Image (cartoon, rainbow, N blue to C red):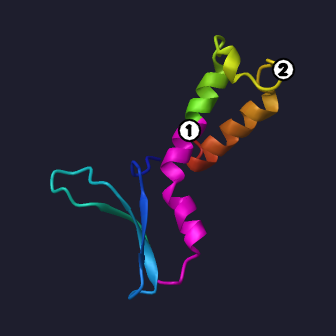
Amino acid sequence: MTHTPGPWKYVPHDTLNGGTIIAPSQSADGLSEIVAHGRCNPNPADMSLIAAAPELLDTLQKCLDVFQSSDMPHSLRVGNGKQPTEDTILCLRMQIAKATGGE
């Protein structure tokens, strides 16, 4: 599963009683891509979270890469200079899989 690259942006529509989440153009025509559109009075906080999804996924993937690295910088180690727990790494893997359709 491949998602539309971010960053995404939520644009509320007063006249349509909803809003649209758009992504920057990935095509030669320069038009933005509509990721989602709603007419049901969405919660702005929910729409902001959805719009942040590509960056959140990218951050999770980078954290997992660093945590799994054998040369993780000391400044990034969790509490008292310890490596992240296996539970933390498993949680990152599970959330990344959930966001990518199990890939």
* Residue in view at x 52 percent, y 54 percent: 52
Where residue 55 appears, x then y in whole percent?
50, 46
Magenta highlight range:
38-60
Residue 38 visible (yes or no): no
Considering every residue shown, the one lying at the far left of the view is: 29
Pick the residue in front: 39 or 74.
74
The residue drawn where x is 81% and y is 33% is 87
Q: CA distance from mark 2 to mark 1?
A: 23 Å
Q: SS for tag 1?
A: helix
Mark 2 vs mark 1: give the one in front.
Answer: 2
In reply to whether residue 25 is colored magenta, the answer given is no
**Image height of 92 relative to 76, above or below:** below
For residue 65, what is the image quadrant?
A: top right
Indicate whether residue 41 is drawn in magenta.
yes
Q: Quadrant of the C terminus?
A: top right
**Circle 1 is placed at which residue position?**
59
Question: How packed is label 2: few (under 14 Cα within 10 Å), some, or many (20 or more)?
Answer: few
Image vertical order of residue 66 relative to residue 15, above or below? above
- What residue sits 15% from the left and 56% below the top? 29
Q: Determine the secondary structure under disc 2.
A: loop
Residue 77 seen in this snapshot? yes
Q: Amino acid at mark 2?
A: Asn
Give the residue displayed 52% in from the left and 84% down from the top: 40
Identified by mark 1, the residue type is: Thr
User: Can you give x and y, in whole percent of width and height, for residue 13 in the image?
Assistant: 40, 80
Relative to 24, is 94 above or below? above
Label placed on residue 33: none
